[in-house]
Image (spheres, helix red, strand yellow):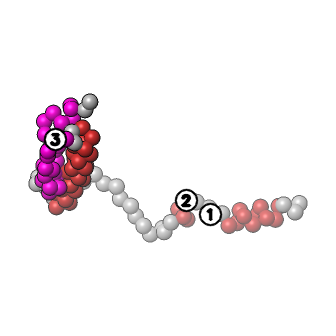
Amino acid sequence: MMVRGPILFFLLLAPTSVASYGPSDVFISFSDNAEEKPGPKEPTDCEKASKDLKNDIVGLEMFLQDKSDHKTFCPYSKWVQPPLKEYKKKPKSYLPKGCKAEKI
């Protein structure tokens, strides 16, 4: 009968309902507000910054890829790589045509 004492003690400490876990004066209302205003039609500053960041990342990847591909596929051809700023404005490969196809 020694076990009975600690069990009764834990039962006294246990909460009696779920409501006792949080404040009782908080009221949460879930309503369907059908009159929500539509979002802005033009892109916001955050969306523009996100798009600019994506272009910067893709531009940097293309810049580094072109540099590597030129050394690998056509190191003997003379090519001046455009500055990184060009890649960021318009992310695309600026390698001369046929450079990648010249690998032997």
Within the image, what quadrant is residue 97 found in?
A: top left
Distance CA(mark 1)–CA(mark 3): 79 Å
- Tell me if I can see residue 34 in this picture: no
* Residue drawn at 40 percent across, 64 percent down: 27
Distance CA(mark 1)–CA(mark 2): 7 Å
> Which disc, if any, is residue 4?
none
Q: Which residue is mark 3?
A: 77
Relative to 68, 93 lies left or right = left
| Magenta extent | 76-102
Q: Looking at the image, is mark 2 or mark 3 earlier in the sequence? A: 2
Relative to 37, 7 lies left or right = right
Front label number (2 vs 3): 3
Helix, strand or loop at disc 1? loop
Magenta highlight: main SS: loop
**Figure quadrant of the N terminus:** bottom right
Give the camera-side residue of 98 and 32.
Answer: 98
Relative to 17, 100 lies left or right = left
Q: Which residue is mark 2?
A: 18
Give how far across and how far down residue 2 sits, in percent.
87, 63
Q: Residues within 10 Å of mark 3 (few under 14, many from 20)?
A: few
Q: Where 96 falls versus 59 (above or below)?
A: above
Q: Which residue is mark 1?
A: 15
What amino acid type is highlighted by mark number 3? Ser
What amino acid type is highlighted by mark number 1? Pro
- Tell me if I can see residue 100 in this picture: yes
Contact? badges 1 and 2 (CB < 8 Å)? yes
* Residue drawn at 21 percent across, 39 percent down: 74
Q: Where 38 falls versus 70 (above or below)?
A: below
Contact? badges 1 and 3 (CB < 8 Å)? no
